[in-house]
Structures are given as structure tokens and as C-alpha cells.
Image (cartoon, rainbow, N blue to C red):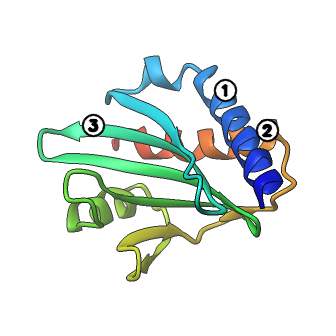
Amino acid sequence: MIEMQKDMRKKVKQLNEVVLSDDVFSQSPYPIKSGFWLPSAYLVAVSWYTIVISDSLSLQFNVVLTPKGWYLDFFDLKLKRTSKQVEDWVNDRKIKFKLNSEKNRLIYIGENDSLPYSASPEDSGKWALDMLKRLTATLD
């Protein structure tokens, strides 16, 4: 278990390096904060990105790694759960999701909605960046 946790932490840190090297942070019309969550008691690692949309909405976008692979989820950081505002924001950008009522988060279910655990840092980073760019896109 300890070796798996170390490997998961390494993969998430590598993904975060790929994402942080992109200009999405400087080109986004919304401020973006980033970091990662590496709990020591679980087999999960998360690279997170908070998109500050307004005073009332901070959309949290998580890139989650488990032994089964990578997936994406979204929620309202201010409320610590999903909200109508987050659902509307994601829907407006034509991002498909399902509600995970247990965690009260939206789980991405569109095209390429997951990656295998073995995905390279470049592939997982590009995958996360694609979604981050979709989430920060302005609507015409």
C-alpha cells in the first residue's frame, strides 16, 4: 500500500507540473488556484484547480487518481458540494456529467471520461488541461 501511495503521489505531482507549465493560467479570464491533495490514509491522490468565477462561485475541478485510474469531478468550493450554479456552468460548456450523490460532486462522463492508471504524465496532463480550458472558456 505504501509503495502504491508513493507512485500515486509521483503521478499526480507530474500531472500538476504539466498543467502548470501551460499558459492557461495567464490566459484564463478567471483566476485559477492549484494544488494537490495527497492523503496518507487512502489510495487516492488529487490534483485540484479552483476557478474563481465570481464572489459567489468558486468551481473546484479535481483530477483524481485511484488504483483503477484517473477521473474528473467538479463541485462548488464555497458550498463544499455541487450546486445549481456549478451544474449550469458545466452544462453551458456542454460538459456531460452525472451526480455522485455520495460525494455530492459532478463526475465527468463525456468522451475520454477516464484514463488508465498507467497513463503517462504528458497524456494525463494534456487530458486535465483540455478540461481546464473548457471550464474557463467564455461563451459567445
Residue 91 percent location from the top left of the image: 37, 64
Please say if the residues under marks 3 and 2 sit with CB atoms less than 8 Å apart.
no
Q: Residues within 10 Å of mark 2 (few under 14, many from 20)?
A: some
Question: Mark 2 highlights which residue?
Answer: 121
Q: Earlier in the sequence, mark 3 or mark 2?
A: 3
Residue 12 to residue 95: above or below: above
| 15 sits left or right of 103 in the view | right
Query: Which residue type carries mark 3?
Result: Val
Q: Going 62% across and 44% down the picture, which residue do you hit?
A: 128
Q: Is residue 67 above or below residue 56?
A: below
Would residue 112 be visible to someone looking at this image?
no
Q: Earlier in the sequence, mark 2 or mark 1?
A: 1
Looking at the rendered image, the quarter that the N terminus falls into is bottom right
Whole-angstrom CA distance, mark 2 to mark 1, is: 9 Å
Left or right: 118 with respect to 113? Answer: right
SS type, badge 3: strand
- What amino acid is found at the position of numbered circle 1 in the picture? Glu
